[in-house]
Amino acid sequence: MERYLDNSATTRPYDEVTEKVASVMREQYGNPSSLHRKGIGAEKELKAARESIAATLKASAGEIYFTSGGTESDNLAILGVCGISRGRHIISTPLEHPATMNTLAKLKEDGWQVDFIPVDRDGVISLPAFEDLIRSDTVLVTAMLVNNEVGSVQPIARMAKILKKKNPKAIFHVDAVQGYCKVSCDVRELGADLISISGHKIHGPKGVGVLYVKKGTRLAPCLYGGGQQDNVRPGTENVPGIAGIGVAASLCHSRMAESVPRMENLRKRLEEGIVSRIPDVRVNTPEGCAPHILNVSFGKVRSEVVLHSLENEEIYVSSGSACSSHKREPSYVLTAMGVDRAMIDGSIRFSLSEFTTQEDIDATVDALATIVPRLRKLK
Amino acid sequence: MKKADIVLLKYGEIALKGLNRPMFEQRLLKNVGKALAPLGKFSIRKSQSMLYVEPLEEGIDMEIAIERMQKVFGIVNICPAVSCDKDMDSIAKTTVECLREMDVEGKTFKVEAKREDKQFPLNSPQICQQMGGVILKNVKGLKVDVHNPDILVQIEIRKKAYIFTEKVSGAGGMPVGTNGKAALLLSGGIDSPVAGWMIAKRGVGLDAVHFHSHPYTSDRAKEKVIDLAKILSAYTGKINLHVVPFTDIQLAIIDKCPKNYLTLIMRRVMMQIAERIAKQGHAQALITGESIGQVASQTMESLAVTDNAVSMPVFRPCIGMDKEEIVQISKKIDAYETSILPYEDCCTIFVPKHPKTRPDIAEIVEAEQALTNLEEMIEDAIAQDEVIVIQPE
């Protein structure tokens, strides 16, 4: 039986989402900008999705912009702020997703100064160090709510308070791609100006995402076109995808009260099972992390061999480092957390969803308890 | 150039064959037919050591057809022709137009004519003479050289008049299928596809054998080999790709044999499996991408040890080539970009730190005794062999 524990990579869409996307493609194929009835029908789908998502964030519908996914949302937020700002300084964390990291690298080439807040062994930033980094010419702070590799949660609300006190003009962007519908994302609590969300991490379709833009926050567009979405993100809207993310967000958010504690318990069961049955492991996921991610290093094995061995049992996980014989780069997130190289090479990420069952967890622990010692014997 | 209405294929080596020549020609005709079939209907005729390829349907893209014919072994030159009405005015006009579209500055030319339609008022020498004059007068920069021309302008008078001015190189070699079949050990690297291509060029059909070491290699490595086989099949036609599960054997070797001989023993077992698969498929030889001294398992001594494991001939066409030369061919046949995709293959994992470069065959044979159930494991691996039929697109 298939056991899918790679939900941080992507999730299985809800059946309701698949049906919504198909029905919109079949029936609401109009262009939302068209003046006739067919256009209005499509526009209604956009409006409904915008309202659904705004409700989950306790934001207003006018603050919701649709993009092609997490990467574009991060790009639009970062480049959008920097594109209209006079300052030269950005603050971020060493744990960010490549969508952020590589956008910052580009800005650095263009002359921007980027500072990274130091993180501790739990993968959480230091607030005093953050406060020290804030300057008068800091225009943007970008930080992720939940780290995609280890699941650590950043103290976003406290960061926002510190930032706004020291430099009220600076914009605060939060990459909530992994955190949305896993931890609370109330915009008033978080205090963020911009929030990135991706559809396919919450059982929605791929190729669609959201950027929450707090009212009054100005952004330079990354694309130029026909004026859709206030010209912040022009281009004919992906109506089926947007309708799909709307349904996914409502469902996923409404089930949080039940699904989050369940995932938390299963994640704990997985961690305890691994730690009690397999020696020489290191749990890289800190206390107080997101409910759905568990990152564990297995000593003396290579993570991709464990991954492919689990694949033989129809258990799907992710390896800590993307690697091959030719190009082998250790995870920068685990490196920043001070994990040593040998343990990084053996790190596996398990990520759960509301579909994960206790049987999935037990079967995974059983499989690991057989596979890991067998692989170690060969070294 | 102007749109070709007919293409003339010239073959080199085949023309030198004696009594076997019709067999080679028939095979070439068939291979060209197969290469063109997906594009539509063509007439392919043989006449005086040449093939005439003519599209029979409207809307066939002759540029794509020529690209496909460039991958058919046995063709030395591909000459596209433009047709026009059978009168000297039209012929002159078309010829001049064709030449003006070419880069002719400082080049030499010669006109050759062939008159199949004897009703045509001028005979061949007269056509040549007249057209030579027309070209000299109307195309700037061209000079005559009847012995060694840069551009050969051929005019054929048949149902219509055909004018050939251009010449594209073909792949050369011999038609695939005229020299039997061999089994290629296809790893996924740069060398083995090149080796397969080189042997296929000599008219040899290919089967391929790939060793898969899941979970130590990913299924992407397998997909990559399928892609490489597909690239090769554009030249060779159908390839039966055998994907043989190899993990258990590898693990047994690691478990039971001395570390410095791991790679060689592994290679020897691979050769044995490939030989059996080759025999089942009626292939008469094995092909590998090895080149002397490239890695420890490719020293002369090591190659002797691998050869010793099988009785079939083992062809290693890259044997005397530098890596850079192999890379050049790999790029030429469009395999390079796929070959360098970074998935591990079964040869790059479990590489011992200090492999023997001067192995001793007696020591190896003795070390292999530790693999008590080797025969059983080989039979198991062959029984689980997954055959993927690769057809050119």
Image (tube, rainbow, N blue to C red):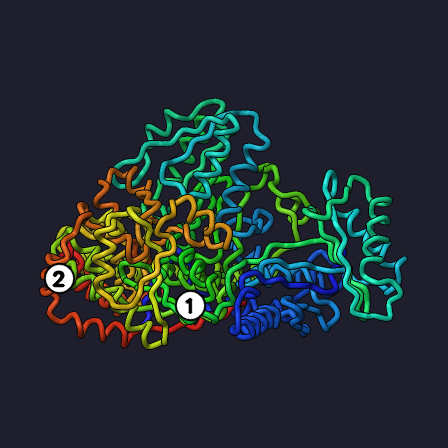
- Left or right: where does residue B352 sit relative to residue B333? left
Q: Is residue B140 above or below residue B156?
A: above
**Residue type beneath disc 2:** Val
Left or right: residue B244 versus residue B201 is left
Quarter of the picture holding the N terminus of chain A: bottom left
In this rendering, position of residue B296 left or right of residue B148: left
Along the horizontal axis of the image, is A188 left or right of B86? Answer: left
Task: Work out whether A244 lies above or below B281.
Answer: above
Residue neighbourhood size for the residue with mark 1, other residues' Cα within 10 Å, grouped as few (<14), some (14–19), many (≥20): many
Residue on which the image places disc 1? B206
The disc placed on residue A90 is none
Task: Name the residue nearer the viewer: A376 or B364.
Answer: B364
Picture quarter containing residue A358? Answer: bottom left
Give whichever of discs 1 and 2 has the lower sequence position. 1
- Look at 53% across and 56% down and name the residue there: A207
Circle 2 packing at 10 Å, graded few (<14), some (14-19), many (20+), is few
Where, by quadrant of the figure, is residue B27 drawn? bottom right
Location of residue A132 in the rendering, given as x and y in whole percent from the top left corner: 37, 24
- Is residue A259 at least partly visible in the picture? no
Q: Residue furthest top?
A: A136
Q: A21 and B221: which one is in front?
A: B221
Say what secondary structure mark 1 lies in: strand
Q: For numbered disc 2, what is the local secondary structure?
A: helix
Subunit under mark 2: B
Q: Nearer the viewer, residue B98 or B232?
A: B98
Amino acid type of the residue tagged 1 in the rendering? Leu
Q: Which residue is mark 2?
A: B365
Q: Is residue A21 in view?
A: yes
Count of labels in the image: 2
Instruction: Name the residue located 38 percent from the left edge and 36 percent from the top edge.
Output: A93
Q: Which residue occupies the foreground of this view, A368 or B354? A: B354
Q: Percent from the top left, x then y, of residue B244?
A: 30, 69
